[in-house]
Every structure is written in C-alpha cells, then in structure tokens.
Image: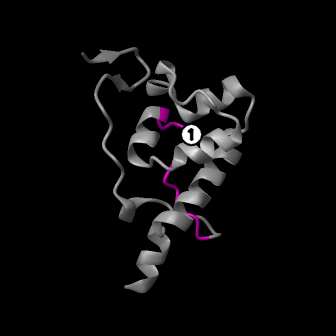
Amino acid sequence: MEQNYGDGKVYGVPAEKPDVSTLNVDEDGITEYVTPDMIIGDIITWYPDASLVLMKCGMHCLSCGVSQFESLEQACAVHGLYVDDVAKVVNDYLTQTLGGAGEKKEEE
C-alpha cells in the first residue's frame, strides 16, 4: 500500500537501484553508492554487505522494522553518528568490493 507523507517520497514502493554508470565518484575515486537520503532498507537490499559496515559503525538495529522506512541520515541522527562519515566508510567499502564506477570508466 502506497503512502505519501508530504516529504516527496512514496513509501511502500521499493525504489529502483541506481545505475552504477550514473553514480558520482569523488576525488579519492570512491563511488557514491550510498547517499544520506537513501532508505536503510533499500541500501541493504541493493548492497547486502553494507550491513556489515553499518553495524561496525554502530548501527545494530538494521533488522528493525523502522530501518525499512528510515533514511541513512535519520538513522545516523538517532545513533549520534555523522552521516557524511558513515556514508564515506560504506561507499569506500563498496567501491573496494564492487569495483567502483570510476574504475570501470577508466578502463574503457
């Protein structure tokens, strides 16, 4: 069942996984797989290994029902974490394990 709470997001409908070729790559070559506005449930669905990194950062409630509707930014605020730092750590890990869009573009 779709719900819209006036924040521009439609809840109850899974978001589409971003196309790797369209993701930003920072000056360190780290692909931006995860952004602060992404829903935790979507992140875990698209990148299951991200859950390991998030737990190491201090988010031990990934299986909580709230995580299916809470953004990374909201979850970091609840846990007293800096969202930019958490996103950077997760993106660094995913870039190393998934190969990163930046590396694919250089190979072509």
Image height of 96 relative to 5, above or below: below
Q: Determine the secondary structure under disc 1.
A: loop
Instruction: Please state if 86 lies on the left or on the right of 43 as rendered.
Output: right
Q: Image quarter for residue 108? A: bottom left
Residue tagged 1 = 36
Q: Position of residue 41 (x, y in %)?
A: 44, 33
Image height of 63 relative to 91, above or below: above
Image height of 84 relative to 9, above or below: below
Instruction: Please state if 63 lies on the left or on the right of 42 as rendered.
Output: right
Stretch in magenta: 29-40
* Residue at 63% in and 39% down: 55
* Residue at 49% in and 72% down: 102
Image height of 35 relative to 75, above or below: below
Q: Position of residue 40 (x, y in %)?
A: 49, 34
Q: Position of residue 32 (x, y in %)?
A: 52, 56
Instruction: Please state if 104 lies on the left or on the right of 89 as rendered.
Output: left
Report the amino acid beneath label 1: Pro
